[in-house]
Image (cartoon, grey):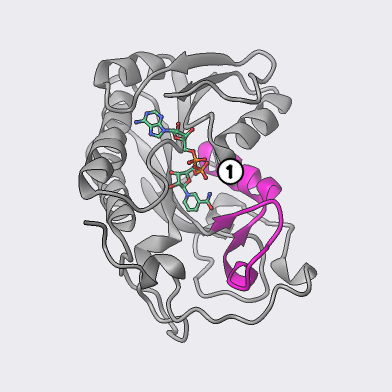
Amino acid sequence: MTWLITGAAGTIGCQVAADLAARGIPLRLLDQCHPDTGLSAGAEFVQADLRDQAAIEKASAGCSAVIHLAGVTHEGPFAAMVEHNITGTHHVLEAARRQRVPRVVLASSHHVTGMTPVSASAAPLAPDSFYAVSKVAAESLGHLYAHKTGVQVIAIRIGSYRSHPSEPRHRVTWLSPRDATALLYAAATRTLSDRFLIVYGTSSNAESWWPRTGWDVLGYRPVDDAGQYSAIGSLTDRFMGGAFADHDLPG
Ligand SMILES: NC(=O)c1ccc[n+]([C@@H]2O[C@H](COP(=O)([O-])OP(=O)(O)OC[C@H]3O[C@@H](n4cnc5c(N)ncnc54)[C@H](O)[C@@H]3O)[C@@H](O)[C@H]2O)c1
């Protein structure tokens, strides 16, 4: 059955759509912008805004999974986070409930724990930005819908999605494109006893700040390790969120 990918014109969405289409999964791709790269073979494109609840519900009809990647992906005014990321995620989950989509995968972020010092041995919720607060809210909405409706929700706290690690912090945070596709595929398909799951989304980096809890439940076995790359320098970050944690709030 068809999968809906929101944010399909974005960095992760374009690559994941191409990878999943190559696996023969029928895709409906949603974004406010048309993908620059064109559409994967057989994929259907829906130009829609997350803020348009009716459009999101229509796009969800007949889908067996939603991979929700769309939203504001950098720090910005709080109102934009509420509209695109919090209300937008609510629309996705509500559409899944009404259209009886059994599985929703939410793109969260490691920035939800971004104010945690890099020396800490645990990473409690400590958002480093308005953006991160919107991801905490998205996770909470996922938890609520998972427990009160028929939708199973997996929230993935994505590290740093890059083709190659290019900054010192990527030794810890890197998520390679092929591992990202493997993780999203597992999150959309794996039979789970839990209704709700949060996992960190990184490659199998030798250095790690975060627990790998849930990887085994999903059957996620990443193949890449940022340690395979040399000369990306020494870590200077004070906080897990890197520059997000150091910047003042907007406004
Ligand atoms: N790239 C990373 O390293 C990283 C790290 C942590 C979390 N994430 C999360 O993963 C997801 C995908 O990230 P990305 O790097 O591909 O982001 P991106 O900015 O490249 O793509 C986001 C897409 O969402 C679309 N979009 C934004 N607002 C929308 C709206 N209101 N309606 C419809 N479409 C809208 C944009 O047009 C864009 O194509 C995001 O939710 C992001 O917060 C990414």
Q: Nearer the viewer, residue 33 or 60?
A: 33
Ligand 1 is within 8 Å of the C-beta of the residue at disc 1: no
Q: How many marks?
A: 1
Q: Where residue 74 appears, x then y in whole percent?
A: 40, 50
Which residue is at 64% across, 53% downward? 162
Q: Is residue 185 left or right of residue 125?
A: right
Task: Kindly state the secondary structure of the residue where label 1 is placed.
Answer: helix
Which residue is at 38% across, 42% downward? 72
Query: Which quadrant of the figure contains the N terminus?
Result: top right
Give the class, few, some or many, for how many residues have Cα within 10 Å of label 1's Cα (few <14, many ≥20).
some
Q: Where residue 5 appears, x then y in whole percent?
A: 50, 29
Q: Is residue 214 left or right of residue 26?
A: left
Q: Quadrant of residue 88?
A: top left
Residue kind at label 1, given as amino acid type: Ala
Which residue is at 56% across, 58% downward? 160
Q: Is residue 164 magenta?
A: yes
Q: Which residues are magenta?
A: 160-188
Which residue is at 24% across, 37% downward? 83
Q: Quadrant of residue 203?
A: bottom right
Q: Is residue 243 left or right of residue 128?
A: right
Q: Is residue 2 visible?
A: no
Q: Where residue 39 appears, x then y in whole percent?
A: 63, 19
Q: Nearer the viewer, residue 129 or 185?
A: 129
Q: Is residue 142 magenta?
A: no
Q: Nearer the viewer, residue 177 or 32?
A: 32
Is 81 placed above or below 165 here?
Answer: above
Q: Nearer the viewer, residue 122 or 126?
A: 126
Q: Where residue 149 appears, x then y in whole percent?
A: 25, 34
Q: Which residue is mark 1?
A: 186
Query: Which quadrant of the figure contains the C terminus?
Result: bottom left
